Amino acid sequence: MKITKVRLGTISVPLRVPFKTALRSVNSVEDIIVEIHTDTGHIGYGEAPPTGAITGDTTGAILGALNDHIIKTIVGKDVDDFENLLQTLNKCIVHNSSAKAAVDMALYDLYGQLYNIPVYKMLGGGKNKIITDITISVNDPDEMARDTKVAIDRGYDTIKVKVGVNPDLDIARLTAVRAAAGPNTLIRIDANQAWTPKQAVKLLNKMQDKGLDIEFVEQPVKGRDFEGLKYVTERSYVPVMADESVFSVEDAFKIMQMGAADLINIKLMKCGGIYNALKIASAAEVYGVECMLGCMLEAKVSVNAAVHLACAKNIITKIDLDGPVLCSEDPVLGGAVFNEKEITLPNAPGLGIKGIEGIRYFD
Ligand SMILES: [Mg+2]
């Protein structure tokens, strides 16, 4: 199975409601689609969301990395030479994790198709069903309480609440959300780097004192402030998850060696795909640090790849793969079935994607 060409395009998928965090506000998913074609007529699919505020990867940067570096290193290569192919992909350009992730997942898709096995089974997974949380955007407390009610009515039992925009409101936000959610809903929060270390400890312990029962907090402080993250982890009763602090397996090792976080959030777009995500998961197994599998605002192509990974690794105990359920349309044929919180993988080879509607190709 030789790679003959790579086609690039974009998809546009509207969101049900605008997505707001401490870092950005977005109305629709506008992602790059990668199709890797082979001499056997197979196609491997990948997706990369431009998230300049998080990864630094803009649409132009993703296209530049693909067109100027990645595509020419993989065209002509044999998919069966899988390990070498993945190492070549990772070595041909530094950073650019979103472009690499899109190609990495398309290669896993093809390798699974070559041997007629779903990717999650290829990775050793024994289950094909996971349960995701859903994100509540950061707004005024009343609006967040209303959004929480909608999420509960849609059947979610775990919600992820964005905080950190005007931190003075964060206690009021969580109080309103907890009141709307009732005592049986799991609430995790994400500050997206918005707090200072001291502010984080004060807010988190106040939430604890008020009995708001927070499962964990994601990235309370700046991503590169590992010392600040450790400061919070040591002083907060609420467990701390590293997200923007961990892009690579090297970051994960550093954070775990320092004891700077209790949990790690793995995202394909931060680490460059399944190949590197597996390394982070293995490192976390060694340290006994449980992981969440998260996503950016992504459509179903790349989130589907993350579902395969999540079904394969027991160290991934928390799932934040709500990209597709935040969208009002699904242009992807095949792949994981998203029935609100329940995500189920079909028994199809590779990543199981049969096609994507509405791709605007660049060629
Ligand atoms: Mg996060």
Image: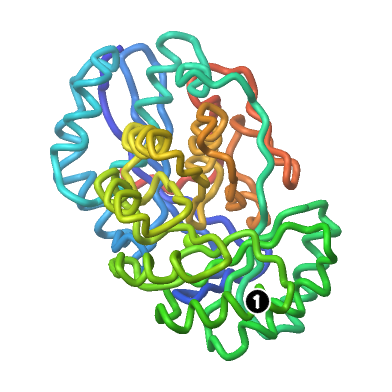
* Along the viewing direction, whichever of 236 and 37 lies nearer the viewer: 236
What residue occupies the far top of the structure in this picture? Answer: 115
Q: Tell me where residue 123 sits by quadrant.
A: top left
Q: Nearer the viewer, residue 52 or 250?
A: 250
Other-residue count near label 1 (Cα within 10 Å), few / some / many at <14 / 14–19 / ≥20: many
Residue 356 in view (yes/no): no
Q: Which residue is mark 1?
A: 207
The quarter of the rendered structure image containing the C terminus is: top left
In depth, the one of 286 and 264 nearer the eye is: 286
**Measuring 50% from the left and 77% from the top, which residue is drawn there?**
201
* Amino acid beneath label 1: Met
Q: Above or below — where is 70 with respect to 202?
A: above
Where's residue 283, x and y in %?
Answer: 35, 37
Q: Quadrant of the N terminus?
A: top left
- Where is 197 relative to 49, above or below? below
Q: Position of residue 212 (x, y in %)?
A: 72, 72
Q: Residue at x 19, y 21 (%)?
A: 84
Horizontal arrangement in the rendering, residue 71 relative to residue 332 (left or right): left
Residue pictured at 51% horizontal, 35% vertical = 315
Q: Residue 3: percent from the left, percent from the top?
A: 26, 21
For the residue with label 1, is its CB less than 8 Å from the closest atom of ligand 1? Answer: no
What residue is rendered at 38% in x and 49% in y? 269
- Numbered disc 1: secondary structure: helix
Query: Residue 138's spot in the image, x, y percent?
Result: 61, 76
| Residue 282 in the image: above or below residue 165 | above
